Amino acid sequence: MFEVRMATADDAPAVARVIRARAAWMRREGLEDWDAWWHSADAMAARATRPQAPARLLVHRSGAVVGCTTLSATASDEEWTTAERDQPARYLSGTCTDPAWRRHRPGAVLAVWALEETAAAGATWLRRSCADDRLMRYYRDVQGFALVRTVTRTGTTHLLARSTLDRPAAACRPLSR
């Protein structure tokens, strides 16, 4: 039903549409940053589709772009300790999904894909972070991440991790590489 593939420059309009759909949902939910997402959608889509570091897209068999994310070998958050950074890990960031596809749980599909990619790379941890409490609970309660800790500096950052050694059998079939 879905595949995961690299984003290309041709995907920028579809990625911007997904970001704007998420921003509209954020506005309806009363989340503060919705307007920044809305007004930055084209720039965010351009970053996601640049050839030197393309995002991965979740694409429905109909061709619809349903979500995007970035999987990296380096942490984007400074809150991970040196010891944690020395462990074999991958970092999931920039995940954005179209709320119209919510019943298919596209964020969870991307997280399973990232877990499988992380395991295939020989890393034992998939990590991610977020600032929103509801999103943290979703990552923890639906996607199976454990809350490592919450850091409060200029704002709140929840650091989460999931072991590749503890994967459900159904998740062991990668969508695509």
Image (tube, grey):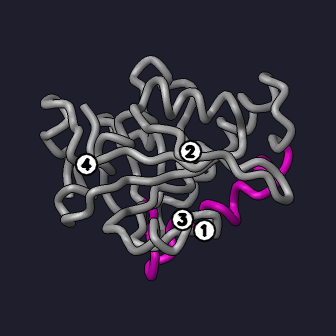
Q: CA distance from mark 3 to mark 4?
A: 25 Å
Pointer 2 or 3: first along the chain: 3
Q: Secondary structure at mark 3?
A: helix
Q: Quadrant of the N terminus?
A: top left
Classify 33 as above or below 171.
below
Q: Amino acid at mark 4?
A: Thr
Res. 46 mark: 1
Q: Nearer the viewer, residue 73 or 35?
A: 73
Query: Mark 2 to mark 4: distance in Å?
Result: 22 Å
Closer mark to the observer between disc 2 and disc 1:
2
Query: On the image, numbered disc 4 is attached to which residue?
Result: 164
Q: Which residues are magenta?
A: 35-55
Provide the major secondary structure of the magenta segment: helix
Instruction: Name the one closer to the observer, 58 or 114.
Output: 114
Name which residue lies at 25% across and 48% down: 164
Say what secondary structure mark 4 lies in. Answer: loop
User: Which residue was labeled with disc 3?
Assistant: 48
Numbered label attached to residue 96: 2
Q: Which residue ends up furthest to the bottom in the rendered image? A: 52
Number of callouts: 4
Name the residue located 56 percent from the left edge and 64 percent from the top edge. 80
